[in-house]
Amino acid sequence: MVTEHVFIKVKPENIGDFIAAMEEGQSILRSAYGAREIAFHRGVESDNLFMLLIEWNQIEDHNAFTKTADFGKFGGLVGQYFQEKPSIQHFTRL
């Protein structure tokens, strides 16, 4: 299992729109092959910072998802609200 951590800074004036778009976006992610669990968090100290956690069966499932139309749809929904390019890291449990 691989956990993807995505840190997303959102333009402050678009926080509400981003949260609404992520509701639909999470449905897209949940339907992706190999996606096991999705969690979406908002920063306490920085309310325009969000963390998306996605547990994948394996890194190859994530890589395959990035080549699908659903990945493009997800990016089209939420990408317009990014203040900067998200930071993405993958982790495995020890």
Image (cartoon, rainbow, N blue to C red):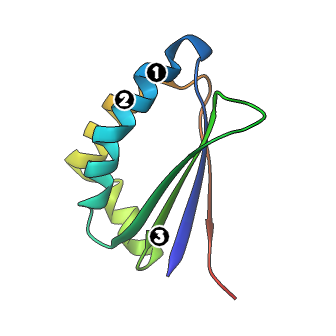
The residue drawn where x is 21% and y is 46% is: 69
Q: Which mark is residue 20?
A: 2
Q: Secondary structure at mark 3?
A: strand
Q: Residues within 10 Å of mark 2 (few under 14, many from 20)?
A: few
> Depth check: 44 or 5 in front?
44
- Disc 2 marks a residue whose amino acid type is Ala
For the view shown, which residue lies furthest in the front direction? 44
**x%, y% of residue 40?**
50, 49
Labels 1, 3: front one:
1
Q: Secondary structure at mark 2?
A: helix
Pointer 2 with pointer 1, Cβ within 8 A: yes
> x%, y% of residue 17?
41, 20
Q: Position of residue 46 (x, y in %)?
A: 74, 31
Q: Which mark is residue 16?
A: 1
Residue under label 3, please give it: 55
CA gap, disc 2 and disc 1: 6 Å
User: Is 21 placed left or right of 43 in the picture?
Assistant: left
